[in-house]
Image: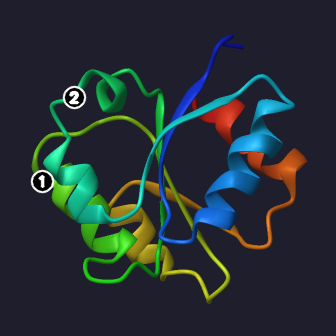
Amino acid sequence: MKEDIKVAYVEDEPSIANLLTSGLGLFGITVHPVFMSAEQLLAEVDGDAFNSADILMFDIRLPKMTGVDLASELRNRGENRPFVLVSAWPPPTNATLQKIRANFLPKPFDFPDVVQTIQKLV
């Protein structure tokens, strides 16, 4: 298992982003950077913080571009790191998840499940 795992996270609700950052931090997983929108991530896609992440995690329901759209865009740009989509809403179809090569985790978070998924993917 890799140590010092870094997760880039897109979440438009600061309280949820803080919860995930704190919760995963207890397991030695760093959530940084946190982007408030898909558009912010795309604007910083060449940045060191984004490029140092081992896993990319996106909320599905974002203000403009959805997490699924963001995942599709990044795959089209050649991004190969693991994706984890999260939502309190129903998950995308299995066909959609396979197309964008992503895993899905429901909100509210069950931290042992989140940690296990992340560790499995790195």
Write the residue at 78% across / 42% down.
Answer: 22
Vertical comparison of 14 with 115: above or below: below
**Tag 2 secondary structure:** loop
**Place of residue 105 in the rendered image (x, y in percent of width and height, measured from the top left):** 67, 64
- The residue under label 1 is 76
Instruction: Measure the C-alpha gap from mark 1 to mark 2.
Output: 19 Å
* Above/below status of 84 relative to 54: below
Q: Callout 1: 10 Å neighbours few (<14), some, many (20+)?
A: few
In the rendering, at what x and y percent does residue 92 appear? 49, 81
Residues 98 and 82: in front is 82
Please report whichever mark, 1 or 2, sits nearer to the chain's N-terminal start: 2
Q: Is residue 12 left or right of residue 25?
A: left
Q: Quadrant of the N terminus?
A: top right
Is there a contact, CB below 8 Å, between mark 1 and mark 2?
A: no
Q: Percent x, y for residue 120?
A: 68, 33
Name the residue type under label 1: Asn
Residue name at image x 17 percent, y 60 percent: 73
Along the line of sight, the residue nearer the viewer: 29 or 81? 29
Picture coordinates of residue 94, whole percent (x, y): 50, 75
Q: Residue at x 80, y 63 (%)?
A: 109
Q: Which residue is mark 2?
A: 47
Quarter the C terminus occupies? top right
Give the mark toward the camera: 1 or 2.
2
Mark 2: which amino acid?
A: Gly
For the point 67% across and 82% down, which residue is it?
A: 88
Would you call the spot at circle 2 few (<14 residues within 10 Å), some (14-19), or many (20 or more)?
Answer: few
Residue farthest to the front, as pictured: 14
Query: What number of labels is visible?
Result: 2
Q: Which mark is residue 66?
A: none
